[in-house]
Amino acid sequence: MGRAALEQELDVTEGTLEHGMPYLAFGSGRPLVFLRWFTPDHANPRGWMRGSEIKTMAPLARHFRVYAVNRAPGMATGTTMADIAREHAEALRAEFGEPVDVLGISSGGSLALQLAADHPAVVRRLVVASSGYRLEDAARESQMKYATAAAAGKRALQHLVTQGIESPVKAKLVGAVGWLADPLVRPKNPADTLAFVRAEDAFDLDGRLADITAPTLVVGGDRDEFYSVDTFRHTADGIPGARLVIYPDTTHLGAIKHQRFAPDVTAFLEGA
């Protein structure tokens, strides 16, 4: 199915939540707030990135009205993950008026965990995918190199795309492609990118996981380039009653595209 046909089928709409947080909404059913992965801009995706996001979330959108929410633009220097979570809690209360299901993927998972710990009355059920209670060193380093280079007006994409590649030859080739492609996806406001990266860099919910009271599902792949299985397990073990699902032979992005991901998430959110 083509992009236009899929958007029409899923009734895609675009809007802004309180605090200026942009979102795309698509699908039908009970609301499911999807907190987006790391993005260069605090904006709704365009072009192929928009199509990719909708296609990836389409299996869930056939059961829920998915609200794909991004961080607010104009993020101030020194903003913390707790500050971002507070804004999201206020926006979700204003929009929905009741607890909602929340799915956080990758960087969105960091935010989802902070949201659930700090504002438990906002979250009905929580799914954290390809994410954990803190960034691991390799992910922290690659994100910071990317954000600081972009803020300095330098090419930066190669710092992200080479993360987790074990072969030096392959890393060099992929890095070269990333360097060439950088102008096509360079942040329009690098200050936003850097502010969020600094917030996630300091994020560590290890001592707060027990504060999460929403029923929680943690999903990851055993070949994730950014998070270890130990981190996934530690995250789930720290949250009372949380479930853990690890997909074998599966990468960071592969986990959310796994054939079992949408059925597993749907069953959990529906109370199975």
Image: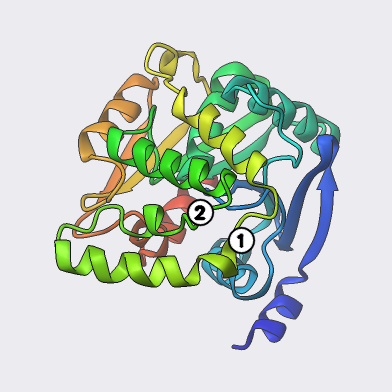
Residue 86 relative to residue 126: left or right: right
Q: Give the mark nearest the N terminus, 1 or 2.
A: 1
Residue 173 relative to residue 253: left or right: left
Find numbered disc 1 in the image and state the secondary structure of the residue it sits on.
loop
Task: Where is residue 132? Give x, y as percent.
Answer: 38, 34
Q: Residue 272 sits in which quadrant?
A: top left
Q: Amino acid at mark 2?
A: Thr
- Crowding at dot 2, Cα within 10 Å, few <14 / some 14-19 / many 20+, comes out as some
For the point 38% across and 72% down, the residue is: 177
**Do residues under tags 1 and 2 come within 8 Å of each other at their CB atoms?**
yes
**Residue at numbered disc 2:** 266
Task: Where is residue 250? Give x, y as percent.
Answer: 25, 59
Q: Nearest the camera: 230 or 124?
A: 230
Task: Where is residue 19? Give x, y as percent.
Answer: 82, 34
For the point 49% across and 33% down, the residue is: 110
Quadrant (top left, top right, bottom left, bottom right) of the N terminus: bottom right
Is residue 138 depicted above or below 207 in this figure? Answer: below
Residue 255 appears in view: yes
Question: Residue 63, labelled with which disc?
Answer: 1
For the point 70% across and 23% down, the residue is: 86
- Crowding at dot 1, Cα within 10 Å, few <14 / some 14-19 / many 20+, comes out as some
Residue 271 appears in view: no
Q: Nearest the camera: 240 or 72?
A: 72
Q: Amino acid at mark 1?
A: His
